[in-house]
């Protein structure tokens, strides 16, 4: 029997892993420019970390992997923000770090949903959280960070879509208006939207099932219920995006899939014609009460998350120059009963920071040279029984076929000197 990966999961094989390394390197470099620091949280948490009171999101209600261990309930993390905020509060980082505290994370997340292209049950997210300062300019800078990463990877067809959910007062007025509006249309709505009507009617507007209904198209707009403070905050966000040189489009349909957002929400999407339903590259928003929910002070924050699989695929489709497999610096050919000497020499070469491949089994010289060619080695070292007896080694530089015989003890130094030429 040949075992298969579980449905909704996949293997990342060596030829694909190098693409991940390249993208991760770009992410780490750009987050460093913005002075974000990495944080790593557990892959599972107490279920209550994710299942917050009256949360209407599909993620919480339908997609979490939850399991019992005795009396304790745990959940594989479906998103990264909750764990970061929990850690921020648990370790009282609000008292030891200068605010805003800026974090990034990378790692697997888990959601039990129908697998499809670009959407798996185990997937990898990169995300950032900027905690402690409520500022339209911070909102814009956070979006700029994600935008810079996407552009650095050569993804060209990108659009920033942004909206505001307003403050608590504005959203309360809007929720009341939506409940009044949708009350006579409840029979038309799907089962999920009927639940959302009770929990958070804003989430009805994010429904993929009911979005083409006439009642959805004529629903009240949140902009009609924003108070002056919320309007002024959003105007400053847009002005800050202009200052950062980030093109954007205001889209009132964005309400985001999680219930903790306030004020600024955004989605950065691919405008490629073949993107289809999976067009979102990264998305996020501001949250005002999330830190205090976990027992910390009343601090605001903003963050976003990027699906790494989708980002890598877009970069590849747009022609990002992923490096081929790292070539070998040195290939050591062993002739005769010299395996231990080959290992000893290879160890010295690696300690000299040379990428080294070696042959330890009896094979013909021709076969070993073929392996050396396939490895892309810049230097081939030939070590046979006669060389071991004489304390010498033959080194061939493949670029110009220069070949020299040197003392075995000088092999690493000779190749290193050639590398500096």
Image: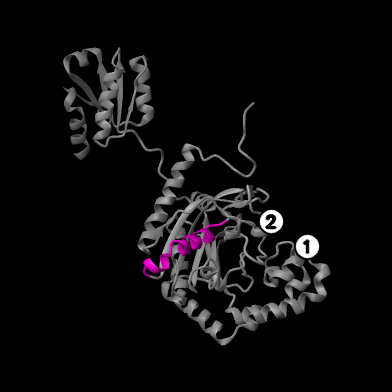
Q: Residues within 10 Å of mark 2 (few under 14, many from 20)?
A: few
Residue 135: where, in percent of width, then height? 45, 76
Q: Judging from the image, what secondary structure is the residue with disc 1 in?
A: helix
Q: Judging from the image, what secondary structure is the residue with disc 2 in?
A: helix
Residue 227 lies in the magenta stretch? no
Number of numbered labels in the structure image: 2
Location of the N terminus (image quadrant): top right
Secondary structure mostly seen in the magenta stretch: helix
**Residue extending furthest toward the front:** 71
Which residue is at a point 45% across and 67% down the rendered structure image? 130
Q: Which mark is residue 191?
A: 1
User: Which residues fall within the magenta stretch?
Assistant: 79-98
Task: Identify the mark nearer the N-term, 2 or 1.
Answer: 2
In the image, residue 53 sits, relative to residue 19, either above or below, namely below
Which residue is at a point 38% across and 18% down the rendered structure image? 367
Residue 95: where, in percent of width, then height? 39, 68
| Residue of label 2 | 62
Q: Nearer the viewer, residue 161 or 188?
A: 188
């Amino acid at each position: 029997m040949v075992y298969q990966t579980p449905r909704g999961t996949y293997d990342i094989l060596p030829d694909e892993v190098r693409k991940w390394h390249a993208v991760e390197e770009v992410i780490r470099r750009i987050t460093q420019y913005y002075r974000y620091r990495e944080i790593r949280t557990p892959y599972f948490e107490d279920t209550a970390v994710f299942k917050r009171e009256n949360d209407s999101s599909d993620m919480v209600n339908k997609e979490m992997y939850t399991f019992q261990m005795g009396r304790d309930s745990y959940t594989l993390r479906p998103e990264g923000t909750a764990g970061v905020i929990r850690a921020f509060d648990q370790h009282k980082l609000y008292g030891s770090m200068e605010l805003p505290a800026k974090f990034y994370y990378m790692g697997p997340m888990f959601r039990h949903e129908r697998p499809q292209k670009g959407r798996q049950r185990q997937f990898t997210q990169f995300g950032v959280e900027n905690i402690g300062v409520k500022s339209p300019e911070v909102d814009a800078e956070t979006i700029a960070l994600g935008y810079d990463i996407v552009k650095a990877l050569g993804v060209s067809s990108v659009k920033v879509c942004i909206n505001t959910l307003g403050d608590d007062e504005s959203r309360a007025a809007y929720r009341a208006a939506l409940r009044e509006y949708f009350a006579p249309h409840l029979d038309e709505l799907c089962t999920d939207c009927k639940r959302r009507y009770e929990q958070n009617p804003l989430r009805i507007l994010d429904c993929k099932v009911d979005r083409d209904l006439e009642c959805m198209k004529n629903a009240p707009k949140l902009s009609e219920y924003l108070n002056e403070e919320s309007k002024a905050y959003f105007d400053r966000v847009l002005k800050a995006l202009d200052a950062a040189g980030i093109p954007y489009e205001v889209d009132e349909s964005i309400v985001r899939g999680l219930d903790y957002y306030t004020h600024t929400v955004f989605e950065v999407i691919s405008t490629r014609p073949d993107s289809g339903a999976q067009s979102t590259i990264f998305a996020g928003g501001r949250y005002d009460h999330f830190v205090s929910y976990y027992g910390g002070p009343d601090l605001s924050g903003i963050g976003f998350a990027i699906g790494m699989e989708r980002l890598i695929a877009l970069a590849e489709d747009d022609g990002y120059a992923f490096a081929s497999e790292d070539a070998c610096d040195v290939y050591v050919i062993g002739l005769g009963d010299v395996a231990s000497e080959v290992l000893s020499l290879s160890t010295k070469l690696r300690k000299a920071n040379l990428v080294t491949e070696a042959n330890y089994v009896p094979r013909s010289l021709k076969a070993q040279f073929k392996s050396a060619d396939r490895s892309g080695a810049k230097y081939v070292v030939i070590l046979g029984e006669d060389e071991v007896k004489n304390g010498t080694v033959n080194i061939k530089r493949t670029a110009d076929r220069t070949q020299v015989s040197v003392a075995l003890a000088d092999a690493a130094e000779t190749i290193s000197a050639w590398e500096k030429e």
